[in-house]
Image (cartoon, grey):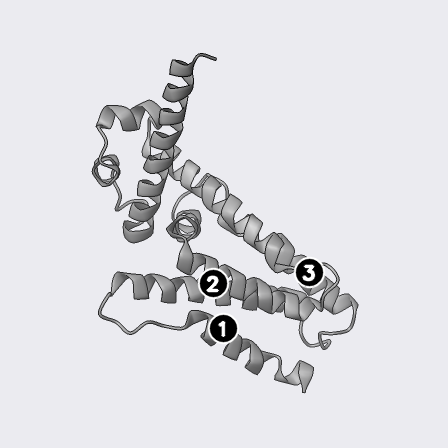
Amino acid sequence: MSGGSMVMQERAVRTRSALVRAAARAFDRNGYDGTSLSQIRAAAEMSMGALTFHFATKGELADAVQDEGWILTEARVRDALTPAGDPVDGLVALTLALAALMEEEPMVRSAARLTRERAGGRAWTSAWRPAAHALIERARASGVLPPVARPEVVADLVSHLIVGAEAQIRASAADAGRPAVDVGGQLARIWDLVLLPVRG
């Protein structure tokens, strides 16, 4: 490949990445229906031609954001879990890691929101739900969870905690005058309360 071709390819990669980041911020803030290609173009400070060269439709941009958010989330989940560790501690670590990632990454918050608001694209929940279900099953099989803690109910708890964390994080980001919320601290305290019967 010639030097000129490499420069053009690198520029195209940078342009595409900038468009995906701008789209993630817009989708995170305004949702799928509330975001237009012209808003994304303006936020990325690019021409409509540059945008449509890479992404013909808003749906294609949303797919790209969901893919990037999924990749970031799957990597964080992998880093957060210790295969030989206590599975209940693993569930706590998983929710705290996801909350921290959502606070850090508009791409991830956007992927979570897009999964709820549109059909198609890679579901953000599929980046972490299998790990959560595996931990729950390990906890059940090892007797760590009491018999009344049915796996499907524990899975619902984890989902609700993560959705609630996302809502808190988005509300804080939308209102700059609002006091910062320690979402990780909230989750840790909720887990302490939930696990009282398990840990005594």
Element assignment for label 1 = helix
Residue where numbered disc 1 is placed = 187
Structural crowding at the residue carrying mark 2, measured as other residues with C-alpha within 10 Å and reported as few (<14), some (14–19) or many (≥20): many
Q: Which amino acid type is marked by label 1? A: Leu
Q: Which residue: 72% across, 65% down?
A: 85
Which residue shows up at 43% across the image and 66% down it? 165
- Structural distance between the alpha carbons of marks 2 and 1: 9 Å
Find disc 3 in the rendering and name its residue: 82
Q: CA distance from mark 2 to mark 3?
A: 18 Å
The reply, left or right, for residue 95 in relation to residue 39 is right
Can residue 129 be seen at all in this image of the molecule? no
Residue 101 image point, x, y percent? 47, 57
In the depicted view, which residue is nearer to us: 89 or 79? 79
Circle number at residue 99: 2
Residue 51 visible: yes
Which of the marked residues, 2 or 3, is nearer the chain's N terminus? 3
Q: Earlier in the sequence, mark 2 or mark 1?
A: 2
Identify the residue at the far top of this view. Answer: 2
Residue drawn at x 35%, y 42% as measured from the top left: 21
Tell me which amino acid carries mark 3.
Thr
Q: What secondary structure is found at the residue carrying circle 3?
A: loop
Q: Are marks 2 and 1 in contact (CB under 8 Å)?
A: yes
Q: Is 127 rendered above or below residue 152?
A: above
Kindly check if marks 2 and 3 are in contact, taking CB atoms under 8 A apart as contact. no
Q: x%, y% of residue 167?
A: 38, 64
